[in-house]
């Protein structure tokens, strides 16, 4: 018997510590229940007299289905009060002062669809709606300004409202867009609006063929937002949209838009032959689009940061990110990622040579690497040549007629234009520009270099090759010239600047051909 008491006593007899913990837990439980009740009472007190929109709408629909008349008066009847006093409180706050038309004044029953149609489209024919055009943000339609027939104004009322809505959506200070300009022609009465200065008296200045207003171009030195394809289409990235502009007809062909406030286009590149456009995004996506059908062909993932540079080599698309990785994508196969290269810093420049034999990549730490044409490379691969620069390597391009040469423009603290021999890794020519070089391209027809600059003058400079002497300066922008693109025939180039303007320049030696085309069109 003593042995059994000793065995079961620990379970039946509570110690002082156990009793203390039991009291603590019971007290906490009582406090929790009391707080819960007080919180529920407070919530019900705050929400008293308020109704959510979904609840209000459901009750309206129920009454319409049960064929009960919905009162348009702020006064509530007895049956409405007995039904739900909370519903009447909401009804008294609504501005239900819409006067019925003579056609439906006798009808007391309306469906929800008819009610919405009446609220949105009903206007009395004998009393047209008047607008106060002196209020900010309201633009008078053309009929109101010119005093045309009111009947014609009523017929075109819907069309005018759509145009005003489109103009509001495409406001230059809020939304990105590309607005077409007109061709500039210099004459005695109308001097040329762009003041350009030839350094060499024997040279001829390019003609400003067209000036465009672009809104939404990101003022980011490390992005590549412009490209010109073999079918004379120019692609320019404006914030979260990409617009296509036909350089032959001078018309905008529409755009590709991302429905996102945080995602933007960070790079664009056309395939060598065709209408396929590659778009790099700020969240690491590389998308392929068919611009004729405006359909996305595929979305290639893999990057974890901004894709700031793209370059095609036949069906191999190379993309560089701000994490320093270069991915090779074979767009013909399902597993597109076939190779990877690595930099220590972000990639801001990427170009395949014209013959496709080598890839040049520039990074923000000032390194220019030359890689072999081997899509199946790994991160352990080493470049053929590495050339160091004081600033980031973004503005660079291969020479079209000497495939071993690469031109590189220096950044803000450098401003030096260098010509590199990629076979030996040596700089064969250089010159100081005393300005940040934001963009660069080779002009094959005239055998010269064209550079776009930032502060202090924001100009475009033509350089003679191989002497690398300045030929002329083009002053067409007030912001730094971030991007340059060359036409397929090499006689035009497109410049996009941070001030929201874009210019199309034409070489003087192609002026006769341009005039002949205009004469044929007029005939």
Image (cartoon, rainbow, N blue to C red):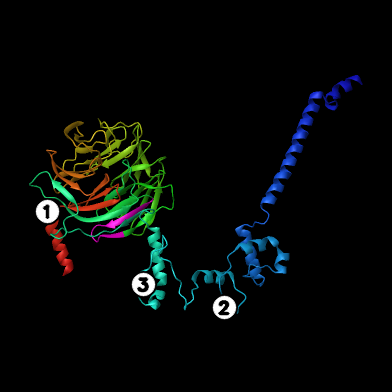
**Nearer to us in this view, 440 or 209:** 209
In the rendered image, the quadrant that contains the C terminus is: bottom left
Q: Few, some or many C-alpha atoms within 10 Å of disc 3 (few <14, some 14-19, many ≥20)?
A: some
Secondary structure under the numbered disc 2 in the rendered image? loop
Q: Few, some or many C-alpha atoms within 10 Å of disc 2 (few <14, some 14-19, many ≥20)?
A: few
| Place of residue 329 in the rendered image (x, y in percent of width and height, measured from the top left) | 35, 44
Q: Is residue 134 left or right of residue 57?
A: left
| Magenta-tinted stretch | 240-252
Q: Are marks 3 and 1 in contact (CB under 8 Å)?
A: no
Any magenta on residue 102? Answer: no
State how far apart marks 2 and 3 are (Cα).
Answer: 31 Å
Q: Are marks 2 and 3 in contact (CB under 8 Å)?
A: no
In the rendered image, the quadrant that contains the N terminus is: top right
The relative height of residue 371 versus residue 167 in the rendered view (above or below) is: above
| Place of residue 502 in the rendered image (x, y in percent of width and height, measured from the top left) | 26, 52
**Nearer to us in this view, 135 or 239:** 135
**Nearer to us in this view, 295 or 125:** 125
Looking at this view, name the residue that lies furthest to the left: 202
Image quarter for residue 134?
bottom left
Q: Is residue 6 left or right of residue 305?
A: right
Image quarter for residue 189?
bottom left
Q: Which residue is mark 1?
A: 509
Secondary structure under the numbered disc 1 in the rendered image? helix
Secondary structure under the numbered disc 3 in the rendered image? helix
Q: Residue at x 24, y 36 (%)?
A: 410
Whether residue 424 is visible here, answered yes or no, is: no
Image quarter for residue 378?
top left
Q: Which residue is mark 3?
A: 143
Q: Residue at x 29, y 40 (%)?
A: 349
Q: Few, some or many C-alpha atoms within 10 Å of disc 1 (few <14, some 14-19, many ≥20)?
A: some
């Amino acid at each position: 018997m003593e042995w059994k008491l000793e065995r079961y006593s620990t379970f039946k007899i509570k110690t002082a510590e156990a009793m203390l913990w039991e009291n603590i837990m019971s007290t906490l439980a009582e406090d929790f229940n009391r707080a819960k009740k007080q919180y529920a009472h407070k919530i019900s007190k705050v929400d008293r007299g308020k109704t959510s929109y979904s609840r209000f709408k459901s009750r309206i629909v129920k009454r319409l289905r049960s064929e009960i008349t919905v009162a348009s008066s702020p006064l509530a009847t007895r049956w409405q009060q007995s039904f739900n006093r909370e519903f009447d409180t909401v009804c008294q706050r609504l501005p239900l002062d819409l006067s019925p038309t003579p056609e439906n004044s006798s009808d007391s029953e309306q469906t929800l669809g008819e009610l919405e149609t009446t609220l949105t489209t009903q206007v009395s024919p004998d009393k047209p709606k008047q607008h106060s055009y002196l209020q900010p943000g309201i633009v008078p339609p053309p009929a109101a300004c010119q005093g045309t027939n009111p009947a014609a104004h009523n017929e075109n009322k819907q069309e005018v409202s759509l145009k005003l809505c489109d103009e509001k959506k495409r406001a230059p200070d809020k939304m990105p867009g590309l607005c077409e300009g007109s061709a500039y022609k210099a004459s005695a009465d109308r001097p040329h609006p762009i003041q350009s200065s030839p350094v060499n008296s024997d040279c001829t200045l390019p003609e400003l063929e067209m000036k465009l207003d672009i809104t939404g171009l990101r003022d980011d030195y490390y992005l590549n937002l412009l490209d010109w394809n073999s079918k004379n289409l120019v692609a320019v990235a404006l914030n979260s949209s990409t617009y296509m502009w036909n350089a032959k007809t001078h018309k905008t062909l529409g755009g590709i838009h991302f429905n996102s406030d945080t995602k933007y286009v960070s790079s664009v590149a056309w395939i060598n032959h065709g209408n396929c456009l590659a778009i790099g995004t700020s969240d690491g996506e590389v998308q392929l689009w068919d611009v004729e059908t405006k359909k996305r062909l595929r979305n290639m993932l893999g990057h974890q940061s901004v894709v700031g540079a793209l370059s095609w080599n036949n069906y191999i698309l190379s993309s560089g990110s701000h994490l320093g990785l270069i991915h090779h994508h074979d767009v013909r196969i399902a597993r597109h990622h076939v190779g990877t290269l690595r930099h220590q810093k972000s990639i801001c420049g990427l170009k395949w040579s014209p013959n496709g034999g080598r890839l040049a990549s520039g990074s923000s730490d000032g390194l220019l690497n030359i890689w072999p044409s081997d899509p199946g490379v790994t991160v352990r691969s080493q470049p053929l040549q590495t050339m160091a620069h004081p600033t980031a390597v973004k503005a660079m391009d291969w020479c079209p007629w000497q495939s071993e040469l690469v031109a590189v423009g220096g950044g803000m603290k450098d401003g030096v234009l260098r010509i590199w021999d990629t076979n030996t890794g040596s700089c064969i020519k250089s010159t100081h520009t005393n300005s940040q070089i934001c963009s660069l391209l080779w002009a094959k027809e005239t055998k010269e270099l064209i550079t776009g600059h930032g502060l202090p003058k924001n100009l475009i400079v033509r350089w003679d090759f191989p002497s690398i002497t300045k030929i002329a300066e083009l002053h067409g922008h007030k912001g730094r010239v971030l991007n340059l693109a060359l036409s397929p025939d090499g006689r035009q180039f497109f410049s996009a600047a941070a001030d929201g303007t874009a210019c199309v320049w034409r070489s003087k030696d192609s002026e006769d051909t341009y005039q002949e085309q205009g004469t044929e069109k007029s005939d």
